[in-house]
Image: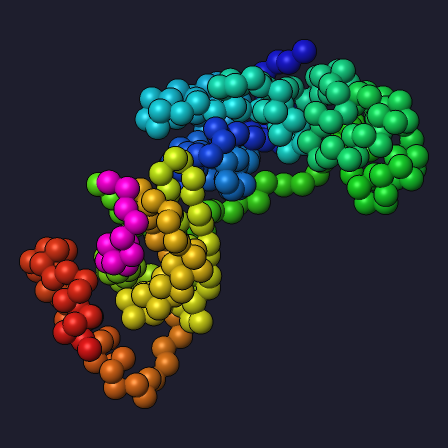
Amino acid sequence: MSRQATAGGQGVVMHVRCPDRLPEETYRQVLEELAGLSPVVQALPPTAALVDLRGALPYYGVDARRLGEVLRIRTISRLGIDVRVGIGPSITVATTASGQIPFPGGVLAIAPEDVAGWLGPLPVEALHGIGPRQAAVLRDYGVHCVGLLAAVPPATVQRLLGGKAGRLAADRARGIDPRPVVPRALPATASVRHRFDEHTLDGAAVRAALLDLVVRLGTLLRGRSQAARALTLSLKFAGGGSWDKSRRLTAPSAHEDDLRQLAYQLMDAAGLQRGRLTGIALKGEDLLDADQAPQQLSLDDARENRLAAETAVDRIRDKFGPRVIGPAAVFRRAS
């Protein structure tokens, strides 16, 4: 039993589920589509998000279901993906609703007056916030649907599931969830990739590709006036396997000297022997504005020379193009 959710003086929350294993770039584009509907968007990486629609409904002059349908049309036409959209008066109801939509996508909107009747018949494990172990405990005591959970005295639920967990489960089974949607953007990242023309075992070729990624990432970060606090190295293998590892820099940086050292450490940690690589990616994570990164005076003349050369090369690339000087030349001239 579902009807269109309306503002009605209550919260109107949209919960969006994207396809599993969605590339981060596409997920960010979905968040941008959501921001076009409402300014209050809470990213739930890697593939979900919450949206507060209370301000959006009077602005657009349509109901919440219509906004969910508009979102699906935009993601399908612009991004080539479908989404599952649950809408309700609270985070619990909206998230539970999106989980009831079959793949690949759809919109399910629950009006405030329909919450109890809609939640009641659902299996207890379908309620947002109820994990497999909690569901197993409740089923052992004969509580197999949300309606029965709502009928159990809260004190009894607390004895079964524990204090806080039991209190939350009892409230949510009754549709009680005062949590607001808290605006939260996905932390900024910057990625560069290299795909090998053929499967490669050549350590020298891999190191050369990694060095090229370091230079490209550093150039990208400095061009955006940003610095990275961490790096993630991703390796793709023939046969579809992958390997990912992240490490934090000792200090935020966009300098190739710092990025290169950490990138080589990550590659060494991979322990490659006979793995056939098809691609490699380097991602700068937890970015911040460059002017917020601490600046320390170095007593290493060789490093200072490399940083000076880096600045000069950036100016040359700005004028003549990004490939006018390759990465090997940069480090050879600076050494």
Q: Nearer the viewer, residue 140 or 84?
A: 140
Against 57, is 306 above or below? below
Q: Is residue 195 left or right of residue 233?
A: left
In this rendering, position of residue 143 left or right of residue 5? right
**Place of residue 79 in the rendered image (x, y in percent of width and height, measured from the top left):** 35, 28
Q: Is residue 127 above or below residue 28?
A: above
The furthest residue to the bottom:
299
Q: Is residue 287 visible?
A: no
Residues in magenta? 198-210
The quadrant where residue 312 appears? bottom left
How far from the left and from the top, in percent, is residue 214?
Answer: 28, 60
- Residue at the image position 52 percent from the left and 19 percent from the top: 103
Residue 125 picture location, percent across and down? 73, 27
Image quadrant holding the N terminus, namely: top right
Left or right side of 311 for 4: right
Please state which of residues 188 and 14 is positioned toward the viewer in this rendering. Answer: 188
Q: Residue at x 40, y 25 (%)?
A: 81
User: In the rendered image, which quarter is residue 331 located in?
Assistant: bottom left
- Name the residue located 70 percent from the left edge and 25 percent from the top edge: 126
In terms of secondary structure, what is the magenta stretch mainly? helix
At 24% from the left and 82% from the top, the residue drawn is: 302
The quarter of the rendered structure image containing the C terminus is bottom left
Q: In this view, which residue lies farthest toward the left? A: 320
